[in-house]
Amino acid sequence: MTRINPDDPKWTAYVFNELSESERAAVELELEASEDARMLVEELRFAAQLTKMELHDAVKIVPLTTEQRAKIRASASVAGRKRWFGVRPAIWMTGLAATAAAAMVLAILSNEPQASRPIAAPQESVAKAEVKQPEAAAPVPALPDVAPPIAGSKTKESALDSKVIDSLRVEPPTTPVANHIPQTLPVVPPAITSPQMVTARMYGDVVDATAARIPGVSVTATNIESGAAATTVTNPTGGYSFDSLAPGNYKLIAELPGFQRSMYDGIQLSANVQKVQDITLQVAAVAETVQVTTKSGALSTQSSMVVSPGRDAIVAGQIGQQFAAGPPPPIIEGARRAPGVPGEYDRIRARPDNAGEAYDRIRDNPFLPVAQNPLSTFAIDVDTASYSNVRRYLNQYQLPPRDAVRIEEMINYFSYDYPQPLGNDPVGALLESASAPWNPQHRLVRLGIKARDIDNRRRPPSNLVFLLDVSGSMQPQERLPMLKEAIRMLVEQLTANDRVSVVTYAGTTGMALRPTRGDQKDTILRLIDRLEAGGSTNGGSGIQLAYDQAMTNFIPNGVNRVILATDGDFNVGITDRNALLQLIEDKAKRGVFLSVLGVGMGNYKDATLEALADKGHGNYAYLDTLNEARKVLVEQMSGTLVTVAKDVKVQVEFNPAVVDAYRLIGYENRALRNEDFNNDLKDGGDMGAGHTVTVLYEVVPRGVPINAAGGPGVDPLKYRQPEPEAPARNASNETLTVKIRYKEPNGNSSKLLSFPMVDREQTFAKSTVDFRFAAAVAAFGMILRESPYRENATMDSVLSIAEDSLGSDRNGYRREFLQLVARARQIRGR
Amino acid sequence: MEDGIESQWIVDALNQHEEALLRYATWVLRDHELAKEVVQETFFRLCREEPSKVSGHIAQWLFVVCRNLAFDTRKREARMTPLEDLEIRVDTNLEQREAVGEIFRFVENLPKNQREVVYLKFQCDLSYKEISEVTKLSIGNVGFLLHGALRAIRKRVLSESARREK
């Protein structure tokens, strides 16, 4: 055993990366040889981390004021222009003189035309602050002398300045508020009491007539004297808060589509006072108040308009006129539809936020004639994110954008009682058929795939690297704070065999927690507690660092996973999406998988996140509530973490002797070419322990028309005569055969399972509880998507089927589904 | 656009170093307002500097200037309002805060040189070389002081691990 000299400063120098190449190599040799050395370095690293955090916390700083920064910038551009300022004496000792001189410079600068002022990109926070000022000749509200939050001073540079301005900015004359997803404005962190605090705080809850709290309500506080307005959106528990308002006389307006606008007038706020103001909203019958924000920043109200299906054109026309002066409202949804085919509910549908909610377009799978397409092939999908996202919209009293509704993810959100796979196979299948509730002439075939359960206590050791987005946008309660809660719950489940590390990224990247044993819960939880949005350290590439940690601590035969949690601000160090996907794919091949957790709203880039998780052999979940976070991270932990079968693909062969046509419900973006089913180089979906995947086909039996109620079908071929009835080889009465391919988690070649099905002519009413519930969810999805194939499915029929098929519903998820359907029905007005 | 480029490097430096400089100045001065003034003045001085003279070592330059200004200010303040002790001490407000833990108290009681090195490393994220230029201590000495401090902290914090290490 080599002895090491712990007094040698090289160990610390190694930790700080201060050694030369050769010194470093020497230390690494010693590290390899000596357990003591490894422990010493590990502990020094830990001590350094704690010291850094504690010293960081101990000395609070107050960022430079906007004014001070402006003066420095003014001085800087003067310095760049001419060096005449060199004659400026050392006036700093008399601070007043400096202030005056710089103020003068500022005055000179502000007389210049806007265009000549150099605003270069990296000036971000400062430049932003300038741009945010109203372009119109609106009176700029005097910025209150906000005492910056001392404890919150970890925010990068002085992001605070622009936030203060943000929260007080005069609303620009643009988008109508109705039908518009309220944007989450950055919320100024609560000011810590400080002698110079001259702002007031106003907060409260927004409730409906039944005292239920309402999230997603846009609340605007307007200073009557100055016209300065600040807007915020209520959090998931219906709370709002303005943390630093200038003292004065305010009016408060709360609004949400589906409710009457509510106004509270004459609220007097004085300095250093916290005012509690709760708000009650009344449900709007058919009338919505459309509100126009005028240039002066004052709010005026247009007359009510009836928004009802069938009058879209008129309403749209009125809105068009009213807003002719301003930039047109973003019509992303409309742009995605074929011209002339407006959706029936477009006007009351949430629009993808122009700030960047991105959904890949989905075109409903059509009916395919079996004669030409006997095979249907797709990769399975165990994601459930779409359901949570749909729920979020509905809870805000908005219909989700069509393409946010992915039916397979909605169906798979729920757990179904499928039997454990037989034998040694990690996956098994269960088939059932009955008449389709929305078209009794058609058959509905359900394929239930179940992955083997693993007892949580017997699960393999996990090496988990959390890659957490801690950028400023993660501040709201339902983002980083909720994630921290969820991670805490996960940590509680870990044991000494597990390893947890945390990498954070914002503009830059930092190692928040070195790999730590799962039983050292205090250490882990302490670190987790300290995470704050807006703070981070060293530069570099977040995802790279996370993967490095995962590789360094790789547990053979264990679970090695990077868990990325973000609100979609995907700045992890590699901006090229393809390079990123490539990296994730490479690492997945080497055994480190990726799971993606989406949080928050607004910045939520659905398409990107799902693609990442797919490449990384991981799953993707959207966490909209703590309950959801618990479901994903804790209840299903073994499923979330342990992949029991990877690259699972499904191919269904239909029997033309029994079936005319079929349609796969959902899985639009998971389709594979038929020949890829047997190609092991083509990726499929992955299944974690205990996962169930449910697939529904709508099947048109021989001789039944495809479109009973005028849905789009395919005309029979005119020239190509159907071949004379090829005598079916076995004259089988099977409807179809399901083939499933999967690989063992560490395997490279696939195994094939095959399950034939004969239709027993079961009626829908006689089908199993799970079958009926899945059908109800599918119908709900089709209605929300306004699918051309929804036939006579209605919200009412969905409700009555679902009410009747709740089963044991241990976690209440199915009951919650009932509420969502009822709410959707209410929003649509039928 | 020479103007844009020339002033841009200063704004970049401001964005990059504002927080660390403020932390450092606040630590020296124990006063937020004075710290802000010092940092503002530091950047005014940067504006008057020829870019070629500071390029490549802006961090060191800023910390040296900020440090001198901060210590000057402290002396000046001390003359005006006599302090019992010119040595930096934890001010009572800070000490009472719960967030302030053992490590902070420990660092505050280190010898002056060592304390400053620890601060420049952990609060301001400077490299050995940069710390050496700011404090005029040799790089070797910086490494030695840091290692000593870190080992002591490790012992205090990781009493459990320390026991394992015979």
Image: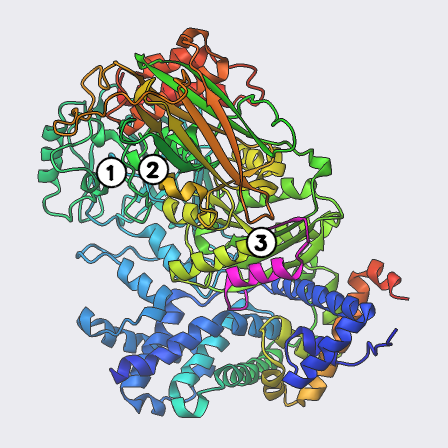
Q: Which residue is mark 3?
A: A592
The subunit carrying tag 2 is A
- For residue A532, above or below residue A626: below
Mark 1 secondary-structure assignment = loop
Q: Mark 3 and 1 residues: CB-CB less than 8 Å, in contact?
A: no
Query: Is residue A473 visible to the viewer in this orientation of the structure?
Result: yes
**Rendering quarter of residue A74:** bottom left
Q: Residue at x 34, y 57 (%)?
A: A143
Query: Is residue A243 visible to the viewer in this orientation of the structure?
Result: no
Q: Of callouts 1 and 2, which one flags the residue occurring earlier in the amino acid sequence? A: 1
| Residue A121 coordinates in the image, percent (x, y) | 32, 69
Q: Which residue is mark 2?
A: A218
Q: CA distance from mark 1 to mark 2?
A: 9 Å
Magenta stretch holds residue A471: no
- Front residue of A354/A372: it is A372
Q: Residue A477: which disc? A: none
The subunit carrying tag 3 is A
**Three-letter code, disc 3:** Val
The subunit carrying tag 1 is A
Q: CA distance from mark 3 to mark 2?
A: 42 Å
Mark 2 secondary-structure assignment = strand
**In this rendering, the label closer to the viewer, 3 or 1:** 3
Q: Of callouts 3 and 1, which one flags the residue occurring earlier in the amino acid sequence? A: 1
| Residue B33 coordinates in the image, percent (x, y) | 51, 69
| Residue A343 coordinates in the image, percent (x, y) | 20, 30
- For residue A643, above or below residue A546: above
- Front residue of A377/A822: it is A377
Q: Which residue is mark 1?
A: A177
* Mark 2 neighbour class, 10 Å CA radius: few under 14, some 14 to 19, many 20 or more: many
Q: Residue at x 51, y 81 (%)?
A: B59
| Magenta extent | A537-562
In the image: residue A821, left or right of residue A412: left
